[in-house]
Image: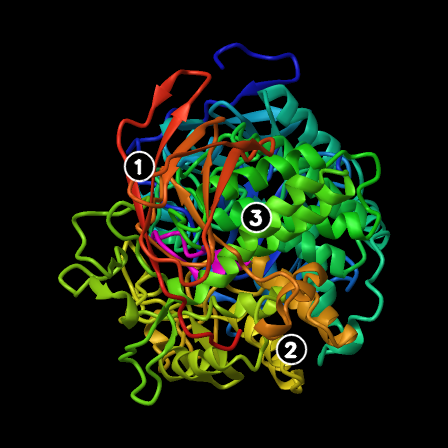
């Protein structure tokens, strides 16, 4: 960076800034009012707006933030100093309802001046554009100076940033760099600039001290920095600020000049015209209660969260929950890909009629699938894993998405079968115990996870049968039937303690027993540990003490009827312990004793807190109520009212009495992610479900298989399944013991304590491996004793396994 370029040169001014490296870096509020990007794929920049100001700028992919924030400061040099996000009241609006172009109007509390800012991105370059118009009392405007204050966090971190003042094409600007480069300029050219360290020599410290710009440092290197540019309002009542990105300094500078060379009005017109090409989903506005306003915003927000380099990749949110308390050690935030969230997103786009976009998402997921058929818990846009947990629902959901596209004839030339077969094989090898359920915290038997796995396997079986893989299809269906037949036994308690009148209900998760995958010997049997609880608080609970509404996924996909007595009773428990009333309607928490949320004093979640209510859970409940034949319009209205001024749906809302000193208000966004793309996806699917009078996510193949009384079913479960990773010691007589392994084997067994010996070679079904069935008859007594021999390796198990036979249990309603 020491070499000069022919197109710009360094301005030394007052020399280097003092006070490096500055305060420890932090991000900013996650409560976004807007997420903005051009619809064109050639403009690879995204940014967010909150509290009337610019926040994170992402480039060249949507998972890479490069700024903390950018705001305006105002002073007349003598009587007042205003920081816009703290001292001005602001009004937010979309310039056009079809586009993500935003107008923010800020007003001086005493009415002396008004600032109108319009935010767009350059339709074809990685440049953020902010047009500013300042009006007011002429005697004030003649003395008013405006300062642009911007804090770069290049390459995802506030440490190690550098900046210098430069002169570019005859105008003063600022260049920032780490690995990526950023250029900041204004259409009229800055009158003065300064580069400083946050908390010591930055522009805010300078102006706050005496309302004058006394510092004009030419550079600030290798620290947490902020840069400042001065604009004479007396000379320039309207101007455009540009923030341009580039992989190298010259690229950022060239993009800056390209963005400023086109009049803002021309860029704004092109920006809006691009978004208008997206159209409007048919039939959804009529299902809303706001005339389709949130519907249009939700669809655009979802589309804006797709990357433009890795086509089809959607992140969970362009935000960092509780960002103001997060530093460089939290690299991920929510700007990562979660397979579960991505499939929710793609499904909502199907609800909007966007088949091609949903197919792009499926193709991207196929490219990120691991060789064993699974997916990372979450990952960067380029497929690099971030967290390392294994969640079976994240393996199952892409299968369901593939099935939906297949049913719609939307796969085009994409051969989805190898991808589906590999994912299904992984589910067969690992289910029913998941390392993490959908809340990403605990291991065991989860109703919501099993719902996704059962639906995924049935969908995979239909796709296999379409490929003439009949034996594989039958095998997958039988495995799904086994899961379905046992899920109530695995995921319920008969001795509930949360509601006196309800003893039998679903639990959030049943922990694995000794000898099962992910069993933790440090935790007492039948207990789960909640690691997000406040230090010193109880964090060990019996499984029967913790509930969530994840079992509603069983109704959603067609595994259980909405009037199933177990579902109805479980909802009574959920409403007793998780339902919270707000001025807009009811909302539900994830599970009782949850610690993931704003602390009780209103402070940020920092490894512990108090779980709050999630609007999307109200959407899931509304889907259940629709399935049950009830009116859901009031629930849709409630959902819509949880949105922010810019239509952003939060992950969580404050569900307790107002705490004005912490800016926490009942029913309004708490400090977690906003927007949460999953919440917008759930809303769009809810509108489609209401329009169709049918739950959009319902899988016809699943409901046709399971939504009949047990005695009328054509596909009753006939199996007990044994795998070395999850052994069983008892089984019901009359079932067949299915022994499964990834490699071919021979089972040597006896039914009469080795008076008679039988041998049975396994059958291969492709990716899922091999299996052998040992049949029993109703009322048969004794035990199956067996051992295994892997012929290709000439290796024996080296021990006998005993599975005792027990009488059938009484039938219950299914």
User: Residue 441 in magenta?
Assistant: yes
Residue sitting at the far top: 3
Q: Residues within 10 Å of mark 1 (few under 14, many from 20)?
A: many
Q: Earlier in the sequence, mark 3 or mark 1?
A: 1
User: Residue 664 in magenta?
Assistant: no
User: Gap in Å between the C-alphas at discs 1 and 2?
Assistant: 56 Å
Which of the two discs, 3 and 1, sits closer to the camera? Answer: 3
Q: Is residue 159 above or below residue 566?
A: above
Residue 50 can be seen, yes or no: no
Figure quadrant of residue 597: bottom left
* 532 left or right, relative to 652: left
| Residue 794 in the image, given as x and y percentages of width and height | 39, 16
Q: Which residue is mark 1?
A: 22
Secondary structure mostly seen in magenta is loop
Q: Which residue is mark 2?
A: 627
Residue at the image position 36 percent from the left and 38 percent from the top: 756
Q: Residues within 10 Å of mark 2 (few under 14, many from 20)?
A: many
Residue at the image position 52 percent from the left and 64 percent from the top: 650
Q: Earlier in the sequence, mark 1 or mark 2?
A: 1
Q: Is residue 800 above or below residue 98?
A: above
| Residue 378 in the image, given as x and y percentages of width and height | 48, 41
Asked if the residue at tag 2 contacts the one at tag 1, i.e. Cβ–Cβ closer than 8 Å, the answer is no
Is 322 in front, or is 628?
Answer: 628
Q: Which residue is mark 3?
A: 396
| Residue 479 in the image, given as x and y percentages of width and height | 54, 50
Asked if the residue at tag 3 contacts the one at tag 2, i.e. Cβ–Cβ closer than 8 Å, the answer is no
Residue at the image position 37 percent from the left and 80 percent from the top: 658
* Range drawn in magenta: 438-451
């Amino acid at each position: 960076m020491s070499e000069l370029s022919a197109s710009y040169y360094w301005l030394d001014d007052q020399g280097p800034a003092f006070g490096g490296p500055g305060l420890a870096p932090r991000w900013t509020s996650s409560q976004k009012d807007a997420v903005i990007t051009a619809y064109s794929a050639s403009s690879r920049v995204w940014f967010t707006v909150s509290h009337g100001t610019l926040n994170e700028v992402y480039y060249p992919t949507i998972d890479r933030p490069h700024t903390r924030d950018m705001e305006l400061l105002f002073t007349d040099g003598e009587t007042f100093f205003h920081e816009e996000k703290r001292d001005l009241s602001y009004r937010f609006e979309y310039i056009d309802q079809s586009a993500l172009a935003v107008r923010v109007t800020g007003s001086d509390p005493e009415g002396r001046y008004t600032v109108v800012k319009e935010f767009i991105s350059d339709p074809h370059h990685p440049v953020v554009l902010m047009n500013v118009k300042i009006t007011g009392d002429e005697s004030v405007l003649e003395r008013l100076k405006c300062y642009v204050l911007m804090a770069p966090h290049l390459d995802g971190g506030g440490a190690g940033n550098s900046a210098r003042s430069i002169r570019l094409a005859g105008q003063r600007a600022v260049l920032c760099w780490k690995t990526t480069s950023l250029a900041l300029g204004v259409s009229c050219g800055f009158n003065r600039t300064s580069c400083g360290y946050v908390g010591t020599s930055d522009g805010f410290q300078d102006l706050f001290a005496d309302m004058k710009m006394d510092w004009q440092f030419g550079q600030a290197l290798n620290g947490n920095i902020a840069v400042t540019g001065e604009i004479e309002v007396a000379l320039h009542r309207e101007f455009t600020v540009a923030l341009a990105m580039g992989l190298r300094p010259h690229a950022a500078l060239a993009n800056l000049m390209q963005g400023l060379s086109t009049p803002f009005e021309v860029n704004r017109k092109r920006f809006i015209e691009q978004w208008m090409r997206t159209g409007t989903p048919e039939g959804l506005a009529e299902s809303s209660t706001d005339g389709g306003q949130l519907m249009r915003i939700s669809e655009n927000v979802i589309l804006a969260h797709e990357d433009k380099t890795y086509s089809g990749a959607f992140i969970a949110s362009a935000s960092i929950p509780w960002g103001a308390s997060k530093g460089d050690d939290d690299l991920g935030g929510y700007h990562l890909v979660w397979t579960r969230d991505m499939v929710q997103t793609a499904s909502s786009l199907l609800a909007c009629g966007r088949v091609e976009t949903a197919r792009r998402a499926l193709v991207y997921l196929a490219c990120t699938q691991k060789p064993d058929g699974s997916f990372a818990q979450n990952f960067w846009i380029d497929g690099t894993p971030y967290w390392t947990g294994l969640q079976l629902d994240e393996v199952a959901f892409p299968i369901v998405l593939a099935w939906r596209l297949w049913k719609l004839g939307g796969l085009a030339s994409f051969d989805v079968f190898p991808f589906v077969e590999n994912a299904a094989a992984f589910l067969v090898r690992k289910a029913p115990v998941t390392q993490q359920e959908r809340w990403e915290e605990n291991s065991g038997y989860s109703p919501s996870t099993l719902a996704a796995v059962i639906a995924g396997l049935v969908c995979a079986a239909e796709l296999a049968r379409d490929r003439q893989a009949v034996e594989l299809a039958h095998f997958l269906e039988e495995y799904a039937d086994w899961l379905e037949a046992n899920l109530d036994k695995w995921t319920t308690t008969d001795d509930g303690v949360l509601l006196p009148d309800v003893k039998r209900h679903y639990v959030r998760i049943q922990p694995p027993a000794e000898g099962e995958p992910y069993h933790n010997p440090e935790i007492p049997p039948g207990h789960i540990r909640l690691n997000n609880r406040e230090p010193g608080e109880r964090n060990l609970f019996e499984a029967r003490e913790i509930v969530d509404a994840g079992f509603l996924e069983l109704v959603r996909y067609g595994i259980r009827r909405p009037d199933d007595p177990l579902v109805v009773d479980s909802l009574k428990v959920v409403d007793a312990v998780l339902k919270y009333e707000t001025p807009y309607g009811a909302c539900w928490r994830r599970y009782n004793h949850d610690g993931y949320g704003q602390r009780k004093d209103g402070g940020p979640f920092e490894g512990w807190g108090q779980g709050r209510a999630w609007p999307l859970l109200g959407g899931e409940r509304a889907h259940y109520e629709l399935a049950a034949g009830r009116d859901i319009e009031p629930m849709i209205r409630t959902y819509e009212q949880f949105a922010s001024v810019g239509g952003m749906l939060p992950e969580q809302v404050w569900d307790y009495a107002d705490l004005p000193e912490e800016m926490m208000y009942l029913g309004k966004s708490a400090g977690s992610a906003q927007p949460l793309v999953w919440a917008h996806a759930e809303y769009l699917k809810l509108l489609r479900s209401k329009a169709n009078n049918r739950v959009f996510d319902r899988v016809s193949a699943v409901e046709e298989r399971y939504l009949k009384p047990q005695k009328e079913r054509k596909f009753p479960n006939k199996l007990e399944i044994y795998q070395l990773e999850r052994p069983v010691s008892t089984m019901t007589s009359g079932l067949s013991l299915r022994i499964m392994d990834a490699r071919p084997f021979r089972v040597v067994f006896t039914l009469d304590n080795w008076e008679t010996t039988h041998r049975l070679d396994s059958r291969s079904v492709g990716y899922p491996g091999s299996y052998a069935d040992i049949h029993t008859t109703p009322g048969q007594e004794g035990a199956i004793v067996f051992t295994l021999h892997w012929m290709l390796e000439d290796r024996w198990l080296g021990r006998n396994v005993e599975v005792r036979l027990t009488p059938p249990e009484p039938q219950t309603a299914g």
